[in-house]
Amino acid sequence: MMKRVLQGLSAGGAALALLCASAAPAMAAGFDLVTTAEAQQAAQAEKTQPAPVRTRSLPKPEAPAITVVSPAPAGRAVAAPLRIEVAFQPAAGARIVPSSFRVLYGLLKIDLTDRLRQHATVTESGVVVDGAKVPEGQHRLFIQVADDKGNTAEQELRFRVGGAS
């Protein structure tokens, strides 16, 4: 059947059809954002570190804002692979610098930026990535971005994958 379809297409169309057919399974499979070993390292670090003193600071009006759109923070567990969507909002008169975007994992702050960038769309308005595989359990991401005036922001995202609590 595929052969008949390809015969009916032009050479460029056939190449595009083959490219799409070969890419579809890879896109559906997703990618490992966090490996099982990294999740275990982060969980162990959380257990061995004393509970941090939680303090709140007022957001700086000149710092960019980071809003997590998905997964929904806290609450019910999410399924993997998951979609991560984050919106950026610069302060008045500033612009977000997409190349400043970073994502760190867990208390050890394992840098996942390069791994995520290979599968994400990062723009001045935010980040969208689909198909992020994360092992079952509790997870903590630190999302960072800066603007063209040197102001930085960090947003913590905690979520749970699967039935583990």
Image (cartoon, rainbow, N blue to C red):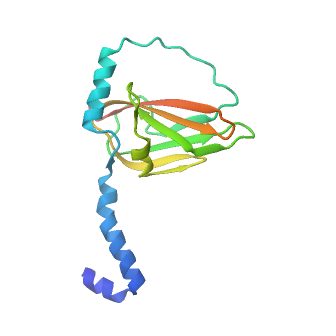
Total count of labels:
0
Q: Please say whether residue 49 is visible from this viewpoint.
A: yes
Locate residue 22 relative to residue 58 in the image: left or right: left
Q: Which of 31 and 100 is in front in this view?
A: 100
Residue 79 location in percent, x, y?
Answer: 32, 41
In percent of the image, x 63 and y 20: which residue is there? 58
Q: Position of residue 135 (x, y in %)?
A: 28, 37
Residue 101 at what x, y percent from top left?
Answer: 53, 41
| Residue at x-position 33% and y-position 75% | 18
Q: In which quarter of the image is the N terminus?
A: bottom left
> 48 and 27: which one is in front?
48
- Please report the residue visible at 58 percent of the width from the left and 31 percent of the height from the top: 153
User: Does residue 164 appear in this view?
Assistant: no
Q: Is residue 120 above or below residue 17?
A: above
Q: Examine the image and state in which quarter residue 3 appears.
A: bottom left
Q: Where's residue 147, x and y in %?
A: 64, 39
Quadrant of res 9: bottom left
Please determine whether, in this image, residue 44 is positioned above or below residue 10.
above
- Residue 13 position (above or below residue 126): below
